Amino acid sequence: MGTLYQRTPGGVWTAEYGVGGGKSRKRSTRTSDRQAALDILEKWTGIEAKRRNGMIDEAGERIAAEGKRGIEAQLAEWREWMESKGSTPGHVRHTFNTAERVLSDAKVRTLGGIVPSAILSAVAGLGEGGASARTKNHALGTVRALCRWAVHDGRMTRNPLAGMRGFNVEADRRKVRRALGDDELRALIDAATHGERFKGMSGPDRAMLYRLAAGSGLRRGEIASLTPESFQLDGDAPSVVVAAGHSKRRREDRQPIRADLADALAQWLTGKPKGERVFQGTMHRTGAMLRFDLRRAWQRWTRETPPGAQRREKRRAGFLREADDSGRVADFHSLRATYITSIVRGGASVKVSQTLARHSTPVLTMNVYTRLGVHDLTAGLDGLPTIDGAPKSDAAALRATGTDGQGGGKGGGNRTAKHSQSSPTGALRLADDASGGEVENTGKLRGNRTDSPSIAKQCKNAPRRTRTFDPLIKSQLLYQLS
């Protein structure tokens, strides 16, 4: 089954034995005692015999071997795997560095040395204990991701951190974003439109950047990747397409947008070179851009009032400020919060809001990104029954049945609904347009469904309907920006 030999007299014994397939293996027994070397050789040949007979679990052997390898080699192979699956270089670098730091602080040398208590202690001490709960949860998540990869790749039997609970983010929020109000967003866009070049981007381009972010909910990196080919602006359902490599979900996203935004984009894209990114400024400085235009908008707003008590009162207000009276801040990602809040405010269902926000769970949509004020919450009470027998207000009664007519006009849809009338032939027609002529409703109005209650309600020869409005993108804010 095997042989022993010494390379030098009195030296250690080397064993040579067969490993199947006509191959042999040479290993040092690390002993100069012949009997001990014979016992070691017998052990090794016995293991090979069991392996040939299928009596040894090769997967278990691999897990045992991987558990003894250095963590540096495991991290390097994990990084290669992240790069191979299409993760962005910035994401790979940040994730790798964070996991490496945590494992180093926890004094982890092998995969088998990953112990929950040591990892938790290392994460808690990040930044000498000054890191926020959100930062700590992110660091914990990177090590969890490493363990998940090791389990899926057959390097570990289980994830030792799977049951660990993260830190309470709600109890330690360092930065709370706010959604911009209608007037704030309008003033911001107007200030950018008439502003000078900043951070390599012209004022009109920054204005379109803000409109696109507030009208689509796309993130900064997703917007930075867009080329003229990314915009599908023709047809009944205009949209913006984000390639899988740039989407946070790592799959192609087709995000619908309103028709008025599509029209503005079509005009703005005229002359943009094909294949090149449409926003050419320093997109990693969008936060500085927004603060710059917020300051200019605030200055214009305060100067509208003559010097005196009213102007001093304006200057103390949180309107158009980076941080409002509650300490909530406005940055570029606040435009995404503005978009989601506007969708929810417009009456969209939870499922529609989640889908448009492209979130994996509605909890993230409603609890993190939606910023409703006290007036929004008070309006939601209109549907409650009146205990004292007093009749509900007309507006509340109409909202309760979904027939308040908000599916058209400035309250919803992609375009302002026009009054309609019946033609002598019974065909459904829209009333006189701005040019004085009649426009037939062919059912192809971009962004408006043919069974929309706003049209059905206004058309004499349309069937009566009590269905609620289509909540796809119903937002007064986004409409008024057109």
Image (cartoon, rainbow, N blue to C red):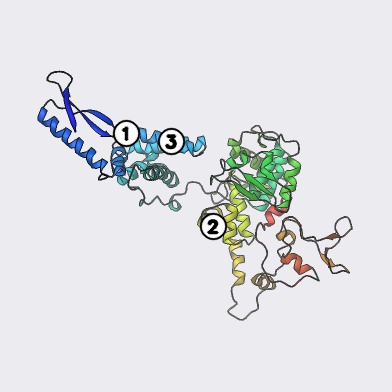
- The amino acid pointed to by label 3 is Arg
User: Which residue was labeled with disc 3?
Assistant: 79
- Counting the numbered discs, the total is 3
Which residue is depicted at the point 78% across and 70% down?
Answer: 462
Task: Give left or right: position of 209 versus 118.
Answer: right
Label 2 sits on what residue type? Met
Return the x and y of residue 136 as percentages of the image width and height: 41, 44
Residue 10: quarter of image: top left
Label 3 vs 1, first from the N-terminus: 1
Q: For this view, does 80 lie left or right of residue 214?
A: left
Nearer the camera: disc 3 or disc 2: 3
The image shows residue 234 at horizontal and vertical percentages of: 74, 48
Residue 264 at x, y = what percent?
74, 46
Which amino acid type is marked by label 1? Gly
Say which residue appears at 16% left-offset and 35% top-offset.
42
CB atoms at circles 3 and 2 under 8 Å apart? no
- Which label was assigned to residue 366? 2
Res 313 seen here: no
Does residue 101 appear in this view? yes
Find numbered disc 1 in the image and state the secondary structure of the residue it sits on.
loop
Q: CA distance from mark 3 to mark 2?
A: 34 Å
Specify few, some or many for label 1: CA neighbours under 10 Å numbering under 14, 14-19, or 20 or more. Answer: some
Which comes before the other along the chain, label 1 or label 2? 1
Q: Which residue is mark 1?
A: 70
Find numbered disc 3 in the image and state the secondary structure of the residue it sits on.
helix
Q: Nearer the viewer, residue 44 or 141?
A: 44
| Vertical side of 323 occupied by 27: above or below | above
Residue 93 in picture, x, y percent from top left: 47, 35
Give the spatial CA distance, label 3 vs label 1. 15 Å
